[in-house]
Image (cartoon, rainbow, N blue to C red):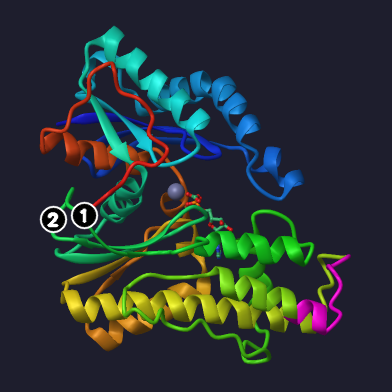
């Protein structure tokens, strides 16, 4: 039995978790800062690091208490080294180092996106490998080949905005608050997703990269041209706005799923993984499942509490990394631009 403590503070969630053998979650504590950043329509880095400092201690204590595991029983301490906001990452890295030092445990650095991919293995069920993984969140939109657990080869990424960022910006433009994804998902349900013709063209160089800044501008132009005002009452959203949101969502999802399907045709994997905060999107669920059926591949989409930022995924990725001999010493530093694959 191997118990790993995971710590995650790369963005606006302070999280700690204990996971057994990289599979069984004994505790998964997440303190979200959504309410702190909502008034600003996005994450404010200075506020984020200050809140991580305040909540890291209590979150760690809760994760250890709920797991019923004592520090000496841990095999390793895994922490998100990057990418993310440097001030936020530092809080988690320092906490992990302190625990590793005091309790003489190996320190295992984890790439945040490796954590998102590993979430698929935490959700139960066996994921046949090799897989192709689409990681789609507020900070990332990337495709990876996963030949085996702990191995990643990047196939494509966004050249500009992440897909979640596009959801958040469109929601902000229409006065729908932050984060935008869940609101747009809800309002788009039952609306006419063909009302506005948005298309996201494939990049001309034939790469597997994505681009979402163009559609954001297209939505802005449409709003100006049609004289659409920001929503005043979120309980009574006009049909024209709901149709616009559904059309926007359909175009973003089509681009994501097209990228995933193309990567699958090239890589010939045995399964598909869709993970990251945007993986909670109902339209993306439907379309990814449909693509999987057409390709004859099972699709693994973890539940929302494991697709959004959490530390169980970091503990699970840390378990795999530790098995592969990954270790850091106490000179470990946060790396906001850490690369994977
Ligand atoms: O993984 P995550 O919690 O944090 C990052 O690492 O970014 O993802 C947050 C992102 C936000 O942009 C949010 O708007 C988006 O995920 N999101 C959604 C949905 N739920 C969350 N986007 C579309 N549809 C959803 N249902
Ligand atoms: Zn994330």
Q: Which segment is the magenta one?
A: 222-232
SS assignment at label 2: loop
Q: Which residue is mark 1?
A: 152
Q: Is residue 320 left or right of residue 79?
A: left
Q: In which quadrant is the N terminus drawn?
A: top left
Answer above or below: position of 269 versus 31: below
Q: Which dot marks residue 274? A: none
Q: Report the mark closest to the observer, 2 or 1.
A: 1
Residue 227 place in picture, x, y as percent = 86, 80
- Relative to 337, say whether 258 is above or below: below
Q: Residue at x 60, y 65 (%)?
A: 167
**Residue shown at the point (57%, 28%) measured from the top left:** 49
Would you name the residue on which mark 2 appears? 148
Does the magenta segment cover residue 223?
yes
Under circle 1, the secondary element is: loop
The front one of 224 and 288 is 224
Residue at 39 percent across and 82 percent down: it is: 204
Residue in the image at 66% along x and 73% along y: 217
Q: Nearer the viewer, residue 306 or 210?
A: 210
Left or right: residue 105 compared with residue 307: left
Asked where in the image residue 63 lies, by quadrant, the reply is top left
Q: Is 310 within the magenta?
A: no
């Amino acid at each position: 039995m191997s118990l790993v403590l995971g710590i995650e503070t790369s963005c606006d969630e302070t999280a700690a978790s204990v996971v057994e053998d990289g599979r069984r979650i004994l505790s998964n504590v997440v303190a979200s800062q959504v309410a702190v950043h909502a008034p600003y329509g996005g994450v404010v880095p200075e506020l984020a690091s200050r809140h991580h400092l305040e909540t890291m201690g209590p979150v760690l204590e809760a994760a250890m208490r709920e797991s019923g595991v004592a520090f000496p029983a841990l095999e390793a301490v895994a922490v998100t080294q990057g990418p993310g906001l440097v001030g936020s990452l530092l809080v988690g890295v320092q906490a992990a180092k302190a625990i590793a030092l005091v309790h003489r445990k190996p320190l295992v650095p984890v790439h945040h996106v490796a954590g998102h991919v590993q979430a698929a293995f935490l959700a139960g069920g066996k994921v046949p490998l090799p897989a192709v993984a689409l990681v789609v969140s507020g900070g990332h939109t990337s495709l990876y080949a996963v030949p085996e657990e702990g191995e990643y080869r990047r196939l494509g990424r966004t050249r500009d905005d992440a897909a979640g960022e596009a959801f958040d910006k469109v929601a902000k433009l229409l006065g729908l608050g932050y984060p935008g994804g869940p609101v747009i998902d809800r309002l788009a349900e039952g609306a006419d997703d063909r009302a506005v013709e948005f298309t996201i063209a494939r990049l001309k160089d034939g790469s597997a990269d994505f681009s979402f800044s163009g559609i954001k501008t297209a939505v802005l132009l449409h709003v100006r041209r049609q004289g659409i005002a920001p929503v005043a009452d979120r309980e009574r959203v006009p049909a024209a706005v709901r149709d616009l949101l559904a059309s926007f969502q359909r175009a973003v999802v089509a681009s994501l799923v097209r990228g995933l399907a193309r990567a699958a045709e090239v890589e010939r994997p045995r399964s598909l993984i869709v993970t990251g905060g945007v993986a909670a999107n109902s339209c993306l669920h439907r379309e990814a499942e449909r693509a999987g059926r057409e390709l004859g591949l099972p699709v693994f989409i973890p539940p929302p509490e494991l697709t959004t930022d959490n530390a169980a995924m970091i503990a699970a990725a840390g378990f795999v990394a530790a098995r592969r001999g990954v270790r850091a010493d106490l000179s470990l530093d946060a790396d906001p631009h850490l690369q994977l694959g």
